[in-house]
Each structure stands twice: as C-alpha cells, then as structure tokens.
Amino acid sequence: MHFDKMSRRSLATGILVGAAFAASGALAQKNYGPGVTDTEIKIGNIMPYSGPASAYGIIGQVETAFFKMINEQGGINGRKINFISYDDGYSPPKAVEQARKLVESDDVLFIFNSLGTPSNSAIMKYMNAKKVPQLFVATGATKFSEDPKTNHWTMGWQPSYQSEGRIYGKYILQNHPNAKIGVLYQNDDFGKDVYKGLKDGLGDKAKTLVVADAPYEVTDPTIDSQILKLKAAGVDLLIDFSTPKFAAQSIKKVAEVGWKPLHIVNNVSASIGSVFKPAGLDNGIGVLSTGYLKDPTDTKTQQDPTVKEFFSFLDKYMPDADRTNLNLAYAYAVSQTVAQVLKQCGDELTRDNIMKQAANLKDFRSPLFLEGITANTSPTDYFVLEQLQMMKFNGQSWDFFGPIISAEAAKS
C-alpha cells in the first residue's frame, strides 16, 4: 500500500514536471520555414546588374551592404542574414531561371525586392504557385499589390505607377490646363501602367490634351527619333515614362535640339547620379518629378539628425558610392522595411508569417521618408506607400513643392 502511494506521488510529480517542461517549451516555440535556422535567414534577390537597366544594379549592392551591417550588429533577433543576389540582365526568362534557383536550390525563405516590372511579372505565377513570398518588389506596377486575394504571396513597396500617373494628371489639370502633352513611354507593362494612370488623372481631357505619344523598346539604342517626333507634334509638355538610361538620353536630346517643353520624368528616373549627371546637370534644370524619399544631395537633408545613420552607413560600407544617386536611399529604406517585417516575425520565421507581418505594418517610417509619409498595410491592402510630393530639379538637387498627395486623393 505504501509502495502504491509512493508510486502515485511520483507519477503525479512526473506529470507536473512534464507539464511544466511542456509549458516552457510552448513559450519558447520556434517555427521555421525553408532557409531558417537558429543562426541564419536566407533571403533571395534578383537584380539587373547587366543589361539595359543596369543603372539599378546599385540597389542590390546597397542591400548587400545593408545586411552586412545588420549582421555585424548581431543580426535580426540573433540571426544573421544570408543575402543571395543574382543577375537577370533585365531579361524575364533569366529572372524565371534565377527565381527557380533561389527557391529550389538555395532554399531561400523568400525573395525580396527583385527589380523590374517584366521580370517580376514573369515570376509572379511561379512564386504564388510555390507559396513563396515575392516581397516588396522593386517596381511600382499596380498589379503587384492590387489583388492580395489572388496573388497573396506578392507585394509591392513603392507608390504605384498608376497612382503616380494620376498625380501628374491632377497637377497638369490644375497648373497647365491648356498644355499640349507628349508622352515618351517604355513599351511594356511598366510604361503602359504609368501612362494609364496619367490618362485616368486627366480624365475626359486626356483625349484633347495628349497630342502625341512615342513608345520605345528596352532594346532600342537611343530614343532620338521619338524625341524628334514629339517635338514635331508641337508638344509643350513632355512626360517621360522611362527607365534611367532612356530618361538621361531624353533630357540630353531635348537640350541638344533646343527644345524647351515643360519636362516631367517619372520617379524611377529621378536619380541625380544615374540620370541627371549623365544628361548634364544644366540640361535638367526645371525638370519636374515626384518623390517620397529625402534627397541626400539637399543641404537640409544633410543636416537632418535622423539621416545621419544613413550617411554613417555609406561612410563605412560604401565610401565610394555616388551620393547623388537616389537609388541608394531607396535601397536603404526598403531594406529597413524588410528588417522591420523580420523583427515582427520573432521566432515564427515561416513563409506564412512573413506575409502576415508584411501585411501588418502600422505607421512604419524610415528616417529617409519625407515628413508625413508612412508605410501601412493590411491583409486587404498591399499598397505599402501611397503618398508622393511634386519636386523640381534646380541643377544640383530637388526642391519639393506643394502638398503631400496621397494615391487615394489622386484617384478622386
């Protein structure tokens, strides 16, 4: 009898101890997806380090340096980032090949900030079929954020091209209602997307205000003939929906032929270093664009205490980088955003939770965002940034003017 009591007591104690261990285990539960260990998170990336959009390659270089800095600071929640970045030459078939390699061979947790509308379009179906996050794509194409239900695993980051186009339309109606508009645009999803936004922003006036347009292919050596066509059409307001190489050519050619239209370039070609310097700084005076990031070349930005961390990062990790290249600020800010997502994930580093946390950003701010701009998402709203401000090039840096315009306001 005594033995039975002892046995029961031992059994009860064992159950209590076991329950305590189970409870503590539950509290410390770690849940990992592919590419994750207690010490590492593998992240994939695809960039055009070569080809017609190679000016954007600096973005991948900044991101590589950013994660090196993060790792030297101890990583994120104690885990180092293994950032694997491949070149696709701005070729959609190559992008598909690299995405498959990252997912099926490198076993990355997700693909982050891969660049270009054509390349991301080519891999979107694959990424969603594989249920691998295609996170914060480096393109403003509307389709990457507009349908979270169908394309649950794909999310943009920057303000959408259609939103940007609508903002230009509203600006023109308010300030240049009698303009003769000519549109230079890249003949692909990117160019057509922002052009659609412009037409939506102009509304019924689009048919009368747009007097000419001129598409170009990314394989074209120059856009000289397109510029001459638009000039001959009597255009006095030129809008450039182009990537950096062609925007630089456009600014330069307009000056060479002595043409003086009001000239607007889209945000992706607003970099002083990769567009305005090659075009000739003086040739770009008076050109308009939109922005959502502080201009590192602006003396006010350089005196901003919240931006000092960014300049310290460049001093240490990219001392030779051209600080007039706005893509540096872009890459740093989007990297800060994905770092925030990973912090929010804690120890539940699964593909499901990556998307859950990316769709749960609340008033996140990079110090490089313009004042008044914040990142917000929800499970039904994948548009991370939806605000822009007009800006004018003064020959050295950008001067912002007018109010912060939200995409919602631009839709109305």
Image (cartoon, rainbow, N blue to C red):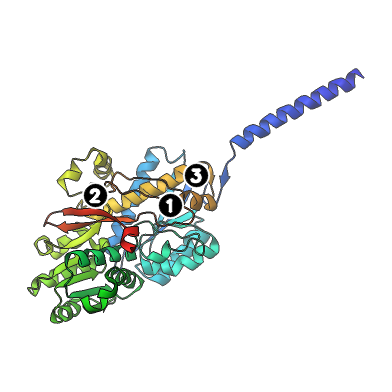
Q: Which residue is pictured at 31% across the width and 68% down the height?
A: 197
Q: Tell me the amino acid under the disc marked 2.
A: Lys
Spatial CA distance of label 1 from label 3 is 15 Å
Q: Position of residue 351 (x, y in %)?
A: 53, 53
Q: Secondary structure at mark 1?
A: loop
Of the pair 392 and 368, the residue shown nearer to us = 392
Q: Secondary structure at mark 2?
A: loop
Q: Tell me if I can see residue 313 in this picture.
A: yes
Q: Position of residue 100 (x, y in %)?
A: 49, 64
Q: Which residue is pictured at 14% across the width and 73% down the height?
A: 236
Q: Which mark is residue 345?
A: 3
Q: Which mark sits nearer the N-terminus, 1 or 2?
A: 2
Closer mark to the observer between disc 1 and disc 2:
1
Of the pair 94 and 172, the residue shown nearer to us = 172
Tell me if mark 1 has few (under 14), some (14-19) or many (20+) residues whose alpha carbon lies within 10 angstroms of its own.
Answer: some
Tell me if mark 3 has few (under 14), some (14-19) or many (20+) residues whose alpha carbon lies within 10 angstroms of its own.
Answer: some
| Residue at the extreme top | 2
> Which quarter of the rendering shows the C terminus?
bottom left
Q: Tell me the amino acid under the disc marked 3.
A: Cys
Q: Which residue is pictured at 32% across the width and 72% down the height?
A: 196
Q: Left or right of 244: which side holds 162?
A: right
Closer mark to the observer between disc 1 and disc 3:
1
Contact (CB < 8 A) between labels 1 and 3? no
Q: Position of residue 29 (x, y in %)?
A: 59, 39
Spatial CA distance of label 1 from label 2 is 22 Å
Q: Tell me if I can see residue 222 in this picture.
A: no
Q: Which mark sits nearer the N-terminus, 1 or 3?
A: 3
Of the pair 297 and 412, the residue shown nearer to us = 412
Q: Which mark is residue 294?
A: 2
Q: Secondary structure at mark 3?
A: helix
Q: Which mark is residue 377?
A: 1
The quadrant holding residue 247 is: bottom left
